[in-house]
Amino acid sequence: MTESLDSERMACWRAYIEASQRLFTQLEDDLRADGELSFADYHVLVLLSEAPGQRLRMGELAGRLVFSPSRLTYQISTMQRRGLVTRQSCPGDRRGSEAVLTAAGLLTLREAAPGHLASVRRHLMDDLDDAEVTTLTRVFDRLGRRLRADRDATSTHRDT
Amino acid sequence: MTESLDSERMACWRAYIEASQRLFTQLEDDLRADGELSFADYHVLVLLSEAPGQRLRMGELAGRLVFSPSRLTYQISTMQRRGLVTRQSCPGDRRGSEAVLTAAGLLTLREAAPGHLASVRRHLMDDLDDAEVTTLTRVFDRLGRRLRADRDATSTHRDT
DNA sequence: GACGGCTTGTTAAAATTTGAAGGAGTGCTA
DNA sequence: TAGCACTCCTTCAAATTTTAACAAGCCGTC
C-alpha cells in the first residue's frame, strides 16, 4: 500500500484526512447544538451576506460551496421553507434564479456566528501558532486555486 | 461576521475548508473513474488490510473512519454484497461482529491503490515542499489527537 | 443467579445527496 | 429568423446518511 508515496507524505496525508473529518463533524455538531443550522446552512448564509445585494446566482453559489446543482436546489429549498432565503428569477437571464438572503436569514446568521466562530477557534485556530497559520493559508490557497482551475479546464474540454 | 477571528485566521480557515472540500470531491471522482470504489470503500479496505488478521471490530472501524455506527453497518453491508469483505461474529463478545477482508477485497485494493495514490500525489502532495509537509503533519496530527481525546471525554461524561 | 445499567451493532423511517433526464432560455450561425 | 448546441436550474428515482428505537450480550452488585 505504499507505492508512490513516501512514508512521511503518507503519514501527512492520513493525518490530514482523519483530522479534517473529525473537525468537520465536530463543527457540524456544535452548530446544531445551538441553533438549528447545519454547516451547509451556515455557509450559504455567510456567502449570501457578503454578496452584493445579498444575493447570488444558484450556479455561482453551487460553485463556491462545492455543491452539485441538484444538491443546492434542495439546500435552498429547505432554507426557503424555513424563511432564511428567498428565490428570485434572475434579471437578464430568464433561465437562472438567485438565492436572496432574508432579514430573518441575516438575523439567524448573526445569532449563530459568534458560537460557530468560537467553535472554530476552540477546535482549530487557538492551537495554531502564526507560522502554522501562514503555512496553512499558503498551502490551501494554492491548492484551492489549482483545483478550481482543474475543474474549469476539464469542464470545458471533454477529455481526461 | 468577523467577531473573534482575526482576518488572517479567517482567511486561513476559509482556504482550508474550500480546498479540502474540492480535494475530497476530486479524489472521490478519480477513484470512481477507474474501479468501482468510493473513497469510503477504499479506506475500509486500507484499514482492514493493515489490521492484524485483516479484520476489525465494527466499532473500532467506525471510530477510525469517523463514521456513525449505522453508517458503517450500511457501508459494510454493501461491501459484503460485492464480495469485498465478510462479517464474522466476534469471538469472546457475542454482541459484536467484525469485518474481515476477503481475498477479492485485497485484490481490489491492490488494483486501486496505485491510481488512488497517484491521484493524491497529483492533486496534493506533489505541490508541497518538505517544510510544508512537516508543518501539515504536525498540525493535523496534533489536531486529530486532540479531537479524538475530546470525543472520548464527552462520550463518557454526559455534559457539554 | 438475577436485576439494572451499559455497550454493540442492527433496523426502520425520514432526511439528504447523487445522477440522469428534462424544460426553458440563450446565442451563435447560416 | 430558424436551427442548433449549449447553459441554467429543477425534477425524479435511486443511493446514501442520519436519527431514533431495539434486541442481545456484557458486567457489576446484591
Image (cartoon, coloured by chain):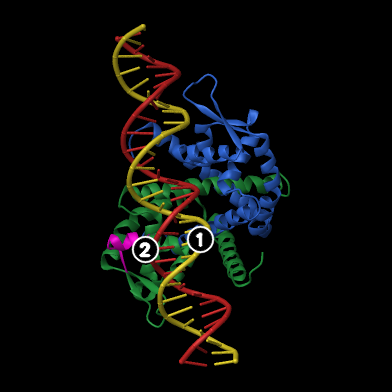
Chain colours: A blue, B green, C red, D yellow
**Chain ID at mark 1:** A
Q: Is residue B82 magenta?
A: yes
Vertical order, A26 against A152 (above or below):
below
The quadrant of the picture occupied by the C terminus of chain A is top left
Q: Nearer the viewer, residue B116 or A43?
A: A43
Disc 1 target residue: A18
| Residue A131 visible in the snapshot | no
Vertical order, C2 against A66 (above or below):
below
**Residue range of the region highlighted in magenta in the rendering:** B75-86
Res. A53 image quadrant: top right
Q: Which mark is residue B86?
A: none
Q: Which mark is residue B76?
A: 2
Q: Position of residue A114 (x, y in %)?
A: 71, 49
At horizontal 54% and vertical 44% (from top left) the residue drawn is: A142
At horizontal 61% and vertical 70% (from top left) the residue drawn is: B153
Q: Amino acid at mark 2?
A: Ile
Q: Nearer the viewer, residue B50 or B56?
A: B56
Answer few, some or many: residues within 10 Å of disc 1's Cα (few below 14, many 20 plus, some between 14 and 19): many
**Chain ID at mark 2:** B
Give the mark toward the camera: 2 or 1: 2
